[in-house]
Amino acid sequence: MFKRILMVLLMVWMGVAGAAEKGTADEAVAMVKKAGDFLKKNGKEKAYAEFNNPKGQFIQKDLYIFTFSANGDGIETSNGANQKLVGKNVKEMKDADGKFLIKDILAVGMGKEGKGWVDYKWPNPSTGTIDAKRTYVERVDDVVIGCGIYK
């Protein structure tokens, strides 16, 4: 099952970020903060629509925003690279090494500080290989917002 999900994600992301310039850690943090401000100002419905918009302001270089409810259920509420994941429970999703990356993302976002970095391995659409990826997550109200970079 994981391999099928991984292949679908890879194919979709190739279209979104295949030739995209690489984003930096600072840009990922800035995008998450910008997304948090947008969410606070506009509410969830408008924010999720904008986060899911492939031509919107939250798709830059190979960076995109994704979100989860901070209740820990694992239901993806937006994903700028793959809208097919929206509304799906991806809590059990594993990376190439078998790490439960969504559980880790939620743990950081729902933790005491409510923000931080999560490291895992993920298909890189620019290289076609499994590469180290680092995602910055931050809780804004009852939403966990994330944006990842390839190392």
Image (tube, helix red, strand yellow):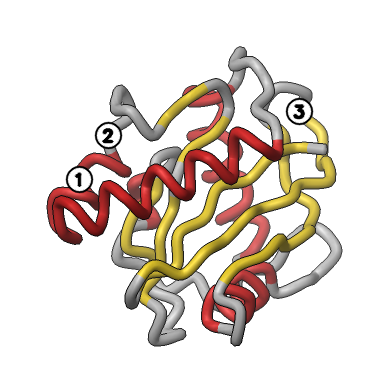
Residue drawn at point x = 57 percent, y = 61 percent:
137
Marks 1 & 2, CB-CB < 8 Å contact: yes
Q: Are marks 3 and 1 in contact (CB under 8 Å)?
A: no
Q: Is residue 29 above or below residue 72?
A: above
Q: Which mark is residue 128?
A: 3
Query: Marks 3 and 1: which is nearer the front?
Result: 1
Q: Is residue 14 left or right of residue 42?
A: right
Image height of 20 relative to 128, above or below: above
Amino acid marked by disc 3: Gly
| Label 2 sits on residue | 53
**Circle 2 Cα neighbour tier, 10 Å, few/some/many (<14 / 14–19 / ≥20):** some
Q: Inspect the image, locate mark 2, and give the three-letter code of the amino acid beneath it.
A: Asn
**Residue 84, percent across and down?**
35, 50
Q: CA distance from mark 1 to mark 2?
A: 6 Å
- Compare marks 3 and 1 and give the one earlier in the sequence: 1
Q: Residue at x 24, y 40 (%)?
A: 50
Which residue is label 1 attached to? Answer: 49
Q: CA distance from mark 3 to mark 2?
A: 24 Å
